[in-house]
Amino acid sequence: MMRIGHGFDVHRLVPERDLVLGGVNIPYELGLLGHSDADVLLHAVCDAVLGSLGLGDIGRYFPDTDPTYRGVDSLILLDHVIGLAKNREYVVGNLDVTVVAQRPKLAPYVEEMVANLARACKVTADRINIKATTTEELGYTGRGEGISAHAVVLMIKA
């Protein structure tokens, strides 16, 4: 049995916040605003996994009204989501993520992001793909107002 899920997330860029993507702290003058660490990449992955199993979305499990999750490392959230999948006897078959950001350049950090996701998803790195793109200065990402991410996951019965 195979199941496919898609996830999307977006957060606004603001001063005085760390920029965390794929569990990697990226040096940049702006960071993502959110209740947790606002890691849009990991939030999109969580939503993709949850969606593939018909389990709703990240807000159902980690509401922004719960102080428990204020500033939390999103790798912890993904670990919980992967645990939910394991309880249903599903594992990640493969995961494909696209991060949309005009700046900063993300290529130097992709390998570390892949390693983080592979570890969190309990799979080998060859099952994880991360791409970064711009919007050619169009829209909110092009103007540097925010960063978004899309994730598609294939979950397979273990």
Image: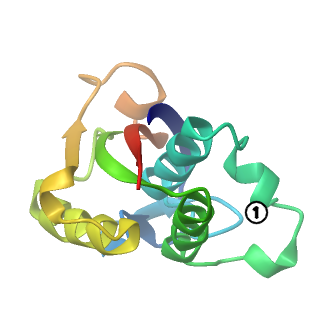
From where the camera sits, is residue 59 visible?
A: yes
- Residue 31 versus residue 44: which sits nearer the camera? 44
Q: Is residue 49 left or right of residue 26?
A: right
Foreground residue among 148 and 104: 148
In the picture as drawn, the residue positioned furthest to the right comes out as 65
SS at circle 1: loop
Rendering quarter of residue 77: bottom right
* 146 or 41: nearer the viewer: 41
On screen, residue 45 above or below 141: below
The type of colouring in the image is rainbow
Q: Position of residue 142 (x, y in %)?
A: 35, 29
Residue at (44, 35) in percent of width and height: 1
Give the x, y percent position of residue 38.
57, 61
**Mark 1, residue position:** 62
Q: Is residue 16 visible?
A: no
Amino acid type at image mark 1:
Phe
Q: Is residue 71 left or right of residue 5?
A: right
Which quadrant holds residue 19?
A: bottom left
Question: Whole-percent x and y of residue 8?
Answer: 52, 35
Position of residue 101 measured from the top left corner of the image (x, y, whole percent) = 32, 41
* Quarter of the rendering occupied by the C terminus: bottom left
Q: Is residue 112 left or right of residue 77?
A: left
Identify which residue is drawn at 37% across, 38% down.
154
Count every numbered label the image shows and give the total.
1
The residue carrying pointer 1 sits among few (fewer than 14), some (14 to 19) or many (20 or more) residues within 10 Å by Cα, namely some
Residue at image location 60% in from the left, 41% down from the top: 53
Q: Is residue 116 above or below residue 151?
A: below
Q: Which residue: 89% across, 63% down?
A: 65
